[in-house]
Structure formats: structure tokens, C-alpha cells
Amino acid sequence: MIVTIDGVAASGKSSVASGVARRLNIPYVSSGLLYRAATLLALEAGTDLGDAPALIALLSGSPLRLEPLPEGNRIFLTPVGEQETGAERDLTADAHTSAVDAGVSALAQLPELREWVNAQLRALTPPFVAEGRDMGTAVFPQAQAKFFLTASPRVRALRRVKERLEDVAEVEAALVARDAKDKAQSAPAADAQLIDTSTLDLSGVIAAVLRGLHQPASSDLS
Ligand SMILES: Nc1ncnc2c1ncn2[C@@H]1O[C@H](COP(=O)(O)OP(=O)(O)OP(=O)(O)O)[C@@H](O)[C@H]1O
Ligand SMILES: Nc1ccn([C@@H]2O[C@H](COP(=O)(O)O)[C@@H](O)[C@H]2O)c(=O)n1
């Protein structure tokens, strides 16, 4: 079984995917973490986020390992020269900074980079919950159940500043800007169930998704 949870930035995709995955006792897969890790490595290497050949060359020499656990995804890099020792660097926290947020959409619009991510996702063995922007459309159109999360920009910004001590208005503006840059790959699947989470708490959204696993497609659960 594959369940897809797509949605706009900070709509709760990873928190909801984790909650649903734990209830179903299966992993969840964060596609955004692969885009984020690639962006982090490019920023650290000084590679242009629009230069697809240079980015693919960088990533080919930087083996990444996604750990898709139900309680949270982590991503690890085997640094150059550490292949023998097996020592890994955990990139997860560094991949969730405002600098990565600001750069990731440029890299994610490159077809070569999308194919690099999608190949890794399609190599995974079901069952899992996959979350991102195009899980139910481009990557796993065959998924058994598809959801698309939204929430107002202000609600999303208020939730995010509880994680990071930043200005609400600036966070809101950055989320709206990221949604605009990600628009091309962020259309809901025609058979996705839409959930507006603005007035729901996390457990309410998870419950709506679990109920939706048994609903016909294309219903509005908000
Ligand atoms: N329904 C909800 N009610 C209250 N808080 C929520 C809800 N959903 C998510 N949150 C909180 O909002 C924040 C953003 O959620 P999360 O990181 O899961 O979103 P995301 O869509 O995966 O974000 P991003 O697109 O940036 O990766 C987290 O602090 C999370 O705990
Ligand atoms: N399926 C996806 C997932 C992510 N992206 C890009 O990565 C960025 C970070 O994703 P989060 O889910 O962690 O917010 C996102 O802003 C997109 O640029 C994507 O294109 N497709």
C-alpha cells in the first residue's frame, strides 16, 4: 500500500504523515528531505542552485542515505574519504534552516534534480506513506489513497514560529514565496482528498486522513 500526503509548505505534511504511518505501523517517506539535503550540500560547496550538471556531479560524489522511520525521517551523508570507515554525517537538522528553505525551490525546479529524487523514491519497497508536493501526481500516481493539505499562510506561520524563533510576518512571507516557486509541481491530484487544516489540531488531521483511507477519492474532508 502507498498513501500520499501532499500539500503547501508547513501545512503539516511530515507531522501528519508520521502520525498516520505510526497508526498504520509502516514507514513514512519525506521527499522534501532529499531536496533539502541536496540544497544544503550545494550551499556548502558553493554550487549554483540552478546548475543541474554541477549539482548532479556533486550529488554523485556525495552518497546520501534516507532513513524513513515512522517517527521521523533522517538523512545521512558519507563524506568523501569516509567510505572505508562507514562514518556518516547526519544532515537532518542542517537541512531545516531558513537558508535551505530560501534556496531549495530553485534546485527543485530542475528536471534532472527531480528525476534524481524520484528515482530514489520509486526504488523504495511499499508499504509507506509518502509526503511532498507531487507524490500523488508524478511519483506515485498508482497510490491507493491520496491527500492534499492546506492551511492559511498566517496559521502555518504561527505554527512554524513555535519551532523557530523568527518573526511571524517574515515567516509568512517566506512561506507564500516558497508556495509560489513550488507551484509547478504542487497541484493536487485529481483523486486527492483535500483537507484544510487551519482549524484542526494535529490529531484531528491525522484522524481525518485515517477516516479518508476508507472514503471515495476527491472528497473534501475539511
Ligand atoms: N493541525 C495542526 N495543528 C497544529 N500544529 C500543527 C498542525 N499540523 C502541523 N502542525 C505543526 O506545524 C509545524 C509544521 O508542520 P510540518 O513540519 O509537519 O509541516 P510540513 O508541511 O512538513 O513543512 P515543510 O513543508 O516546511 O517541510 C510543526 O511545528 C507541526 O507540529
Ligand atoms: N515532492 C516534493 C517535495 C519537496 N519539494 C521541494 O523541496 C522543498 C522542501 O520540501 P518540504 O516538504 O520539506 O517543505 C519544497 O519547498 C520544494 O521546493 C518538491 O519540489 N517536491
Image (cartoon, rainbow, N blue to C red):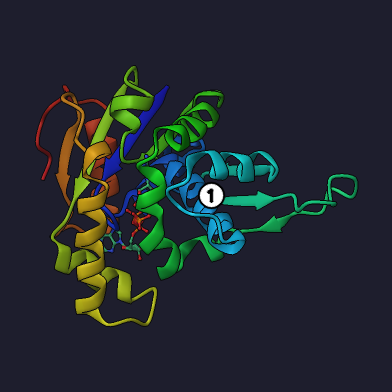
Q: Quadrant of the N terminus?
A: top left
Q: Is residue 72 visible?
A: no
Q: Residues within 10 Å of mark 1 (few under 14, many from 20)?
A: many
Q: Nearer the viewer, residue 181 or 93?
A: 181
Q: Is 101 on the left or on the right of 203, as rendered?
A: right
Disc 1 element:
helix
Does residue 22 appear left or right of residue 162 in this picture?
Answer: right
Query: Which amino acid type is shown beneath numbered disc 1?
Result: Ala
Q: Residue at x 63, y 46 (%)?
A: 58
Question: Measured from the top left, where is residue 192 in percent x and y?
Answer: 20, 30
Image coordinates for residue 29, horizontal then vertical, percent: 48, 39
On the image, numbered disc 1 is attached to which residue? 38
Q: Residue furthest right?
A: 84
Count of residue discs? 1
The foreground one among 18 and 207 is: 18
Q: In the image, is residue 81 above or below residue 168? A: above
In the picture, residue 93 is in which quadrant? bottom right
Does mark 1 have its CB less than 8 Å from ligand 2?
no
Image quadrant holding the C terminus, namely top left
Residue 98 place in picture, x, y as percent: 40, 69
Residue shown at 29% from the left, 58% from the top: 10
Please tell me which residue is depicted at 50% across the width and 36% down the height of the picture. Answer: 25
Residue 106 sits above or below residue 5 on the image: below
Residue visible at 35% across and 51% down in the picture: 105
The quadrant holding residue 110 is: top left
Q: Residue furthest top?
A: 142
* Residue 220 picture location, percent across and down: 9, 36
Res. 48 in view: yes
